[in-house]
Amino acid sequence: MKRDAYRFLQLTETVIYLFAGFLIAGGAAVLLLSTLVEGVHHLMRGDYGEVALGLLDRVLLALMLAEILYTLLRFAKEGTLEATPFLVIGLIAAIRRILVLTAEAVEKFDLADPAFMAVLAELGLLSLMVVALALAMRLTKSEAGR
């Protein structure tokens, strides 16, 4: 009886992971497809900056979803959770935000604008976050090698 309950819970966990994986994969596919459609519309209007910014933002978001899916599948298969995939997701997210902020700031702000200081502060914090995540990845890999 106890063994049957354990198997049922394991099966339920696997179904949940598979369902979540399908949702993430579907979301990434819809995201990339909508990016392509919007990109074509912007290209036809001559909004090349919008095309570049949209591609940069959404393709990096799709990569984050792919990394989450990889982590989810690996956890479902092996039953153990590792820190490295989450650090990669954090790095991609921080770099994505830095690139998008920088691209938007070039068009919107001048040096006299008070909002420019907020953007600079956010860029500084994001840069520190990238360094911290990269250091954490290095420490994680060196601990795994021991």
Image: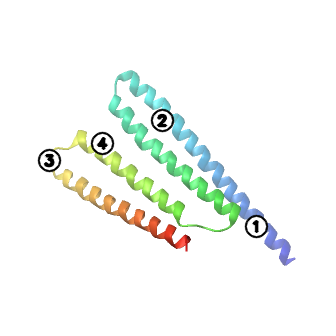
Which residue, given by chain and number where applicable, does mark 3 sit on?
111
Instruction: Give the CA distance from mark 1 to mark 4.
Output: 46 Å
Q: Nearer the viewer, mark 1 or mark 4?
A: 4
Q: Which mark is residue 35?
A: 2
- Pick out the residue farthest to the top: 44
Q: Residue type at mark 4?
A: Ala
- Mark 4 or mark 3: whose residue is earlier in sequence: 4
Q: Secondary structure at mark 3?
A: loop
Q: Which mark is residue 36?
A: none
Residue 92 percent location from the top left of the image:
44, 53
- Mark 4 or mark 2: whose residue is earlier in sequence: 2
Instruction: Give the CA distance from mark 4 to mark 3.
Output: 15 Å
Q: How is the image coloured?
A: rainbow
Q: Secondary structure at mark 1?
A: helix
Q: Secondary structure at mark 4?
A: helix
Q: Which mark is residue 10?
A: 1
Quadrant of the image occupied by residue 1 = bottom right
Q: Residue at x 84, y 75 (%)?
A: 3
How many residues crowd around disc 4 within 10 Å: few (fewer than 14), some, or many (20 or more)?
A: some
Residue 79 percent location from the top left of the image:
68, 67
How many residues crowd around disc 1 within 10 Å: few (fewer than 14), some, or many (20 or more)?
A: few
Instruction: Give the CA distance from mark 2 to mark 1.
Output: 37 Å
Q: Which mark is residue 103?
A: 4
Residue toward you, 94 or 84: 84
Instruction: Give the CA distance from mark 2 to mark 3.
Output: 32 Å
Residue 140 percent location from the top left of the image:
50, 69
Q: Residue at x 84, y 78 (%)?
A: 2
Q: Secondary structure at mark 2?
A: helix
